[in-house]
Image (spheres, grey):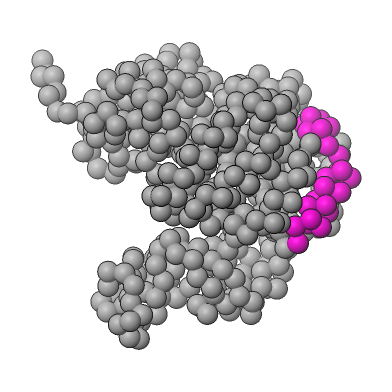
Amino acid sequence: MKAKTIKPTKVNVVTLGCSKNTVDSEVLMAQLRANNIAVEHEGKGHGHNVVVINTCGFIDNAKQESIDTILAYVDAKKQGLVEKVYVTGCLSQRYAPELKDGIPQVDAWFGTRDLPKLLKTLNADYKHELVGERLLTTPGHFAYFKVSEGCDRKCSFCAIPLMRGGHISVPMEDLVKQAGKLAANGTKELILIAQDLTYYGLDLYKKRNLAELLSRLSDAQGIEWIRLHYAFPSGFPMEVLDVMRDRSNICKYLDMPLQHGSTNMLKRMRRGITQEKTEALVASIRDKVPGIAIRTTLIAGFPGETQADHEDSLRWIERMRFDRLGCFTYSHEEDTHAFTMADDVPDEVKRQRAAEVMELQGGISFDLNQAKVGKVFKVLVDKAEGGRYYARTEHDSPEVDNDVLIPIAPLQHSSLSLGDGRGEGGEGVGVRPYLRIGDFADVRITAAREHELEAVPV
């Protein structure tokens, strides 16, 4: 019989899916650390004996990635490389009964709001005084900042309310305290996230209160950029734009998933808006905040989408000229309203339409980037790799938007040296940076491609 381990628990947290899952993992890790339990994020070796997989269940590809990851760690358990495998997050919330039957080797399954139960299973106490505390998995100079949980919208394609529940805003006072703690630890950029950012405050304050929240977060000492993700277009609180325009540390950037350009499709998606109202909203946003970059996300191949709907959407994209745009093929999700419709667009047609959207956007992005050549921008330096810095302007969010590539130059004089002599990831002996990871710098754009800019420091 195999002897029972006497090794102390060391937990490896594996995060899949969106930035909201990232925050959940960071909160879990802070709680474990406070309980004197060793924890790492996505550790590559086998120095851990417990694995917690924070899953995504949003669309087919994400679900498959989550299942593949679970199976890989179950196999590691069979080989004796880990002792316990726990699964949490959206996939577990939505499909736990089926998954328990299909993958019985998993030791326990937890939903999206089961943190206290998960901690108890790991022999840890949920510490209420740590609410808002996190161990960042991002570079320390930026942090995703979740202002609410769940969603009350009834979009016909979306399963998020099934996995995350109804909308719950985090009290403003708690968010202000969290921002202050992050800033004190060196965070300079807050990326505000929620299932629906513009719904913030309706449950607590009986009004959309994102504008006041932004004003208060903007006052936090040390926070130099605040970025807005996932704003819903219908009922958009226009006073947010006044704060964005007037506060220098709120990025002129808005991530607003619009999902489609055809009014016919928007109605079928239950988005509560039309093409004409969307165009008017975007025009108002650009008028109120000159120079704002708008990022959006679209769905190709929604049930009932005709070639005429697709072409209507392409013409709309051409008119709108979004700064950033992503496109996904439709995923037929159980228990959503759209699941009652026939999934009648063939997969190959979905992929072709998504490719046409991205090809069109590629040309728009190239033109918009070319117009930046010769201009000076403030950038935040994210990392150094392969002899170059990777930085971002206020118009770019991490991982999804443009990179600004800056060459790491040889040291000219010791007074210019900042760092440890290795270039903060730069290559070669004697090469030192004149920029530091997590610092802001002014750069001049020297070249541009569809999704990259090249620059030199000013």
| 366 left or right, relative to 398 | right
**Residue most extreme to the bottom:** 412
Please tell me in which quadrant of the rendered image residue 172 appears.
top right
Percent x, y for residue 34? 29, 32
Q: In the image, is residue 181 above or below residue 69?
A: below
Query: Which image quadrant is residue 157 in?
Result: top right
- The magenta-colored residue range is 266-290
| Residue 66 location (% of width, % of height) | 46, 32
Does 370 appear above or below 239? below
Name the dominant secondary structure of the magenta segment. Answer: helix
Side (left or right) of 295 relative to 456: right
Which residue lies at the image location 27% right of the left edge and 69% below the top edge?
420
Q: Is residue 54 visible?
A: no
In the rendered structure, the answer to whether residue 119 lies left or right of residue 345 reads left
Instruction: Out of 238 and 18, give the one closest to the viewer.
Output: 238
Say if 125 sits above or below 34 in the image. above
Residue 303 place in picture, x, y as percent = 76, 31
Instruction: Name the residue at 30% across, 39% down.
Output: 40
Quarter-of-image position of residue 342: top right
The residue located at (56%, 55%) in the rendering is 225
Say which of 291 and 217 sits in front: 217
Q: Residue 320 vs residue 6: left or right?
A: right
> Does the rendering let one see residue 289?
yes
Q: Is residue 279 magenta?
A: yes
Residue 21 drawn in magenta: no
Residue shown at the point (59%, 22%) measured from the top left: 165
Residue 317 image position (x, y, % from top left): 79, 53
